[in-house]
Amino acid sequence: AKEPVRVLVTGAAGQIGYALVPMIARGVMLGPDQPVILHMLDIPPAAESLNGVKMELVDAAFPLLKGVVATTDVVEACTGVNIAIMVGGFPRKEGMERKDVMSKNVSIYKSQASALEKHAAANCKVLVVANPANTNALILKEFAPSIPEKNITCLTRLDHNRALGQISERLNVQVSDVKNVIIWGNHSSTQYPDVNHATVKTQGGEKPVKELVSDDEWLKGEFITTVQQRGAAIIKARKLSSALSAASAACDHIRDWVLGTPAGTWVSMGVYSDGSYNVPVGLIYSFPVTCCNGEWTIVQGLQIDEFSRRKLDATAAELSEEKALAYSCLS
Ligand code: NDP
């Protein structure tokens, strides 16, 4: 039998946490033959609620779940973890300045970075979900210098999956037949959902999305804004945020990273920029990646047209600004 993998979920008593932990315990993230031990962290005001989640995990009698650590102690939570899903973060509250939210999150990610660096298992893989996800991941990377930068990522898979969903609805095809959309840049409203290289499996073979959706105006307009604003649309409809799809996307992100992407298919991940596609080095930026043997690689050589170039640059500019704001909170 396989050794259990230890998976940390921070903010585990929150909405996303509540949707995510049962998925992990059922094998959705790491596969149906991989036992797991869940480490759940939250802050003291959420301790009782966190304990309730732990009770439910016991009651669900998940065969793959070999143990649960539920704690408000960062060191205990981080000790020995192989995978860390960082969902906890300070929420945007009405009337708060962007800088105030940034400042709270910078200090949270700085201290959690140190705990992970000192106590996580070697080669721990990190996924940041809490917003501002790209910049929180960058702070985590800066304050955990001994964790390889390749191991620190942020979630843009939900945006990627939303783009697949929109194309599938528009063309009335199975979502599993659509592939190779791209989310470039920040997990924010400046992200660029790009279908220039996306394809659909049809009876007549693989066809470009651009050929099947002949309405270029829709692809450059409504499609992009629908994906960018989908989170707000769900809050409006549900009066709660999109926790189910965020949790599912977090599972997809880790599963593909650990177990690999299918041949000929790429996914979107927020990763440390090496300057590919002229994106400034030193930002955590969402790129198209393939994964093999537990490592991601940025897909190279894609043609970037004039329209796309402007969008890639605009979202990079926003990330540079966020980075500067985050650093100003540190000093
Ligand atoms: P959620 O579980 O709904 O969201 C958690 C984080 O994920 C937020 O930053 C949220 O951003 C972000 N997020 C990213 N993508 C999505 C998406 N598609 N849909 C929804 N959220 C998304 O928040 P809760 O408030 O329910 O839970 C947060 C938990 O974190 C609580 O249990 C709380 O106690 C804990 N916490 C921990 C802190 C710490 O570790 N020091 C500090 C503060 C809270 P956005 O804000 O933009 O919605």
Image (cartoon, rainbow, N blue to C red):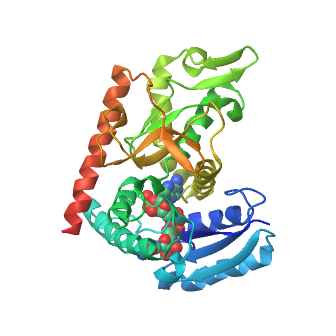
* Visible residue check, residue 230: no
Picture mark count: 0
Picture coordinates of residue 161 (x, y %)?
58, 41
In the image, is 56 to the left or to the right of 100? right
Picture coordinates of residue 270 (x, y %)?
45, 48
* Visible residue check, residue 121: yes
**Relative depth, front residue between 237 and 156:** 156
Q: Quadrant of the C terminus?
A: bottom left
Q: Quadrant of the N terminus?
A: bottom right
Picture coordinates of residue 154 (x, y %)?
46, 53
Q: Residue at x 32, y 48 (%)?
A: 283
In the image, is 70 to the left or to the right of 10? right
Image quarter for residue 167?
A: top right
**Relative depth, front residue between 148 and 201:** 148
- The relative height of residue 188 versus residue 54 in the rendered view (above or below) is above
Q: Residue at x 52, y 24 (%)?
A: 197
- The relative height of residue 8 versus residue 258 in the rendered view (above or below) is below
Picture coordinates of residue 7 (x, y %)?
60, 68
Image quarter for residue 326?
A: bottom left
Q: Residue at x 51, y 39 (%)?
A: 289
